[in-house]
Amino acid sequence: MSWFVLALAGLVEIAFSQSIKPTANFTRPLPTLLCVVLGATSIYLLARAMETLPVGTAYAVFTGIGAIGAIALGMAVHKDPADPGRLLALALIVAGIVLARTTASE
């Protein structure tokens, strides 16, 4: 169950990362409120997952999911470049998450 909660935390983190820009430097009240709620929710879920998962593993997987989602959405939605270096970085992050999951003791 902790791995599910951790994956959910990572997905909320992706939404959080995408909610920052619409705040216009935190000058727009509703987007700012959404951003704060998403950020707090992702950290809450991470903390719940860390009740049984090792802190380092959980945090690495959490940030990896967030990074993958932010980069992928940047390329898909915001037309960020999808050059070989970025794609290799994504592959390495995915490999790291898989390795962390498969070697974890929970």
Image (tube, helix red, strand yellow):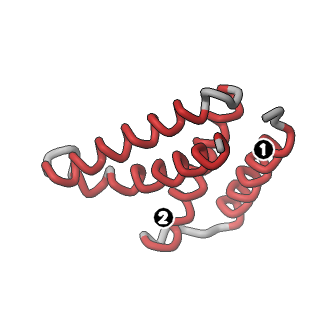
Residue at (30% x, 47% y) in the render: 35
Residue 53 in which image quadrant: top right
Vertically, is 81 above or below 11?
below
83 left or right, relative to 88:
left
Vertically, is 68 above or below 55?
below
- Of discs 1 and 2, which sits in the foreground? 1
Residue reaching furthest front? 1
**Amino acid tagged 2:** Gly
Q: Position of residue 39 (x, y in %)?
A: 38, 41
Q: Which residue is mark 1?
A: 101
Q: Position of residue 41 (x, y in %)?
A: 40, 42
- SS at circle 1: helix
Q: Position of residue 85 (x, y in %)?
A: 69, 59
Determine crowd level at label 1: few under 14, some 14-19, many 20+ residues with C-alpha closer than 10 A.
some
Q: Which residue is mark 2?
A: 74
Q: Which mark is residue 37?
A: none
Q: CA distance from mark 1 to mark 2?
A: 25 Å
Is the N terminus in the top left, top right, bottom left or bottom right quadrant? top right
